[in-house]
Image: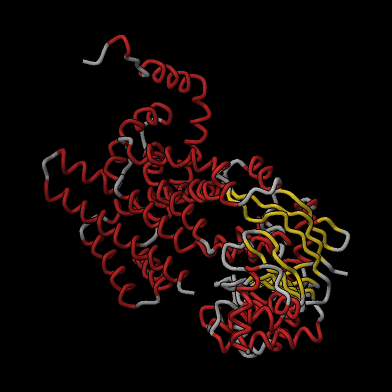
């Protein structure tokens, strides 16, 4: 149902946008486009199919465009060209009001540095999505408390984010996304700012939740281990282009090119 | 010498347009002037009519409410008492009324302009140079047309004070809004928050400590205008200073000067404590 189809999406930052777009479409590389038009290519002809009910990992190094790409799905960033479908809806074609309704009801997001409102309590943060939608406070609080309990923060609902550790903050971020009750959850380097141990806990918790929830999760990471651990499917991004898409197994055993092979090599050696 | 053929003067057109303003639109300015005057007189009559101890209690209460510190609150009360002992109570209340009026109008003007400046690039391009002009243009230059438009008295004093003192509030409102954590704004946007909701429920509360710092600066700058304001007919501490200067009565001038400093310190501490209290959460 809630599958996402990304079709030929380009994102150009700054400079002579149209010229850069033409150049990118004719297959000229990033550095040359920057030299000729002063524009930086964020995404270059990205097409992806994200099936519903799975954790789809988009992996790449910093600057590969992965955070830019995930922000196209809820249009925090507007594409320069291309289309993005959620089911039958073309997200790029939504007007402001429709876009807001889409964000309210269909998609939620977890951020790398949490993005919690420091002047609101854990509970108020967790129920933000519901309150924006107009859910009455009592009802929203009930749902919010349930999720706060599920992510293991019972008793902290009246604390402020500043009183919590990083891992706890991200649990609030997760509770906020899940309380919104959307089928689609975007997670932008959600666990990257956490300590290794807490990170592993959160990964396991996410997998465990997913066995009951079957949400469509788009998970961004720069960490191969994380991608292999939680991803049902992985797409690897380099310089704004998709280099390979496949299951963890396919990525490990049949790397599409040298770049992916180098990524995977360290891992294979470690497990040899 | 600079060649004389290249010189232009904006004196004549400026003078002409001011004359036209006065002659043709005088009634509009009179209406604005009346409104401000009525409000100012109301504030003044409250402050001057209230018993001195009630005013001191309000000051101490505000200081304690903002800071939760007994020492600071007692100091504020003591300073206000000292003003009374210097025989400057009535003048201080007049000056305070002027300050409150100027501050109130500064908030009404400054905060919305600051928000627009933060939100729109075009607005920024216009606002920032205008603010530079407002802060550097000698106040006497705009006092003269203000006098012609509004007549002598309290109203042009309020307006001159606002022109000089509103820029820091605009600048810091702008800064405060732009400094709100980008990811927090992104998050509330991603969950479908409307622009109005994001502004009033997320950006404004988070920018409040910075906005309060701007308000504090606005009040300080307004106080530094009281002597100039009294030259065009505002009563109060500035008038006493001016009187002291004109009669070479150094002691009298110093007393009133101290009164201004005390009022500045008291208002500074109170507004600062509110800024911090909000920021602490």
Report the side of B11 relative to B120 (left or right). left
Report the side of A52 relative to B120 (left or right). right
Q: Say whether residue B23 is visible.
A: yes
Q: Position of residue B71 (x, y in %)?
A: 30, 76
What is the basis of the colouring in this image?
Answer: secondary structure
Occupied quadrant, residue A8: bottom right
Above or below for B128 versus A30: above
Q: In front here: A263 or A240?
A: A263
Residue farthest along the top direction in this orientation: B5
Above or below for B211 versus A106: above
User: Which residue occupies 32% across, 39% down?
Assistant: B136
User: Which residue occupies 43% across, 19% down?
Assistant: B19
Q: In front here: B67 or A41?
A: A41
Q: Position of residue A95 (x, y in %)?
A: 78, 50
Quarter holding the N terminus of chain B? Answer: top left
Occupied quadrant, residue B9: top left
Q: In front here: B128 or B85?
A: B128
Q: Position of residue A18 (x, y in %)?
A: 66, 41
User: Which residue occupies 73% across, 61% down?
Assistant: A74
């Amino acid at each position: 149902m809630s599958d996402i189809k990304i079709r030929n999406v380009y994102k150009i930052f700054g400079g002579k946008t149209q010229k850069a777009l033409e150049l990118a479409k004719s297959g000229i590389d990033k550095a040359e486009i920057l030299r000729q038009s002063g524009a930086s290519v964020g995404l270059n002809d990205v097409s992806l199919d994200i099936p519903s009910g799975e954790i789809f990992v988009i992996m790449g190094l910093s600057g590969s465009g992965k955070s830019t790409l995930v922000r196209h799905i809820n249009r925090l960033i507007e594409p320069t060209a291309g289309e993005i479908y959620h089911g039958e809806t073309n997200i790029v074609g939504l007007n402001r009001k429709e876009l807001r309704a889409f964000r309210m009801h269909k998609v939620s997001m977890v951020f790398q540095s949490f993005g919690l409102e420091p002047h609101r309590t854990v509970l108020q943060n967790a129920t933000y999505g519901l309150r924006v939608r107009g859910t009455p406070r009592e009802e929203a609080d009930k749902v919010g408390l349930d999720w706060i309990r599920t992510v293991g923060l019972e008793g902290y609902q009246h604390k402020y984010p500043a009183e919590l550790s990083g891992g706890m903050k991200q649990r609030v971020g997760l509770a906020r996304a899940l309380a919104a009750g959307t089928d689609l959850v975007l997670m932008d380097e959600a666990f990257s700012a956490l300590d290794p141990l807490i990170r592993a806990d959160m990964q396991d918790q996410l997998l465990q939740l997913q066995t009951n929830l079957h949400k469509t999760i788009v998970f961004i990471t720069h960490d191969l281990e994380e991608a292999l651990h939680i991803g049902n499917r992985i797409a690897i991004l380099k310089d704004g282009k998709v280099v390979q898409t496949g299951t963890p197994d396919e990525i490990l055993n049949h790397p599409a090119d040298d770049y992916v092979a180098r990524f995977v090599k360290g891992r294979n050696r470690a497990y040899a | 010498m600079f060649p004389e053929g290249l010189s232009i003067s904006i004196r004549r057109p400026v003078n002409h347009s001011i004359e036209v303003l006065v002659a043709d639109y005088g009634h509009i300015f009179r209406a604005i002037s009346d409104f401000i005057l009525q409000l100012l007189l109301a504030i003044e009559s409250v402050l001057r009519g209230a018993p001195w101890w009630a005013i001191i209690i309000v000051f101490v209460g505000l200081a304690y409410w903002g800071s939760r510190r007994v020492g600071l609150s007692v100091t504020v009360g003591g300073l206000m008492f000292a003003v009374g002992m210097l025989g400057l109570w009535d003048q201080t209340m007049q000056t305070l009324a002027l300050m409150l009026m100027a501050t109130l109008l500064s908030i009404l003007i400054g905060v919305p302009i600051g928000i627009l400046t933060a939100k729109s690039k075009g607005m920024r391009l216009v606002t920032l140079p205008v603010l530079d002009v407002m802060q550097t243009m000698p106040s006497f230059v705009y006092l003269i047309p203000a006098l012609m438009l509004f007549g002598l008295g309290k109203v042009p004093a309020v307006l001159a004070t606002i022109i000089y003192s509103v820029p820091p509030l605009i600048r810091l409102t702008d800064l405060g809004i732009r400094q709100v954590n980008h990811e927090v704004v992104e998050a509330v946007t991603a969950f479908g928050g409307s622009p109005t909701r994001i502004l009033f429920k997320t950006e404004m509360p988070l920018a409040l400590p910075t906005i309060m710092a701007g308000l504090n600066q606005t009040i300080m700058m307004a106080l530094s205008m009281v002597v100039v304001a009294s030259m065009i007919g505002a009563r109060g501490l500035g008038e006493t200073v001016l009187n002291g200067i004109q009669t070479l009565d150094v002691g009298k001038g110093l007393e009133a000067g101290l009164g201004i400093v005390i009022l500045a310190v008291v208002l500074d501490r109170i507004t600062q404590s509110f800024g911090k209290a909000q920021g602490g959460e």
